[in-house]
Amino acid sequence: MTPFFIGTVLNLASLYMIAGVGCAILKRCGEYNLGGEGQIYFSGFFCAILLQHFQNFPPFLAVSLCLIICFILTSLITLFSAFLKDKFNADFLFTSFIISSAIIPLINGLITGKFRGTTGNLLATEFIKESFRFTQILPPSKLNISFFAIILIPIIIGLFLFRTKLGREICLCGVSKEFALYAGINQKKTFYIASLLSGGFHGICGVIAICGTYYTCHLGFHASLGWNALSACLIAFANPFLIIPSSIFLALIITSANNFALYNNFNFDMSGIIQAIIMFVISFSIFQNISYNHRKKGCE
């Protein structure tokens, strides 16, 4: 394997890790965030636009502000789904997916319209300044210094979920809401916090993608990022510690499939087929858990 291939795999895995952690937190609370694609796209678009307005800021300050702002904005998206679930008993899985499906064409319209860059024929925003781009560590691959910080995030979140009071409360709500109720846990608070963190980490993924990989928000850059991050989370059984190897494994498979398709002149998306197979296999355990929960409620 060449350094370019290794760097490409690790860079893709880092994006899966950060978004996969967001999926894992909410999964531990008993819900699924299916809006990852739209949340990453939304964050990446705002990051690219914000950095155009931060031209005179020091790079560290500009990127830090983007991370904070995009974390908050994408958190608001998942908090809205949480609000609908809390107040109207709307299905979080469904509303997160619908909101994401509405965001994607909206961002597409903005990129191809008012915010399209003036350089080149690419359907994208203006490229960010070179000083705002993360330093590459295995050129010509896009692997950059953010990888060393990202790989620590699943470990920190794992310690948070399994070693802190709030983290254990989030996990307990996902295991048994009835027991959590009798234990006196504020389920509404834990649900909102888990939703906030889930959206926020997807937002961070969007910023990392723009500053470390694409340097612009081009049309459809989000494609498969959210779903593959969810796949990495489910392969790891929503265990943040296991998201690191599962993300690397998934990135390795997808990168290898894309290279194979490129070198053999295949005219279809092999990575999409692999993603579909993985989601299909994982779905058996998901439906098994859903069926068990329905039987359990019927017995009650």
Image (cartoon, grey):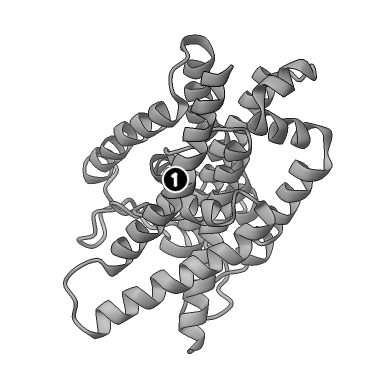
> Where residue 71 appears, x then y in whole percent?
57, 38
> Could you say which is closer to the camera, residue 249 or residue 14?
249
Q: Nearer the viewer, residue 72 or 258?
A: 258
Residue 204 visible in image: yes
Check disc 1: other Cα within 10 Å, few if <14, some if 14-19, many if 20+: many
Q: Residue 213 placed where, x, y %?
A: 46, 64
Could you tell me the amino acid type at mark 1?
Ile
Residue depicted at 80% across the width and 20% down the height: 183
The quadrant of the rendering that contains the C terminus is top right
Q: Residue 177, image x and y in percent?
A: 65, 23
Q: Which residue ends up furthest to the bottom in the rendered image?
A: 1
Count of numbered tags:
1
- Give the residue pinned by disc 1: 40
Q: Is residue 76 visible?
A: no
Residue at point 47%, 34% (across, down): 291
Foreground pick, 60 / 83: 83
Q: Which residue is outermost to the top?
A: 87
Q: Relative to 265, is 6 on the left or the right?
A: right
Instruction: Indicate whether 289 appears above or below 252.
Output: above
Vertical comparison of 137 with 180: above or below: below
Q: Residue at x 28, y 52 (%)?
A: 219
Relative vertical location of residue 213 with respect to residue 65 in this rendering, above or below: below
Q: Image height check: is 165 above or below 206?
A: above
Element marked by disc 1: helix
165 sits left or right of 60 in the view: right
Q: Position of residue 258 (x, y in %)?
A: 32, 74
**Residue at x 43%, y 48% (from the top left corner):** 284
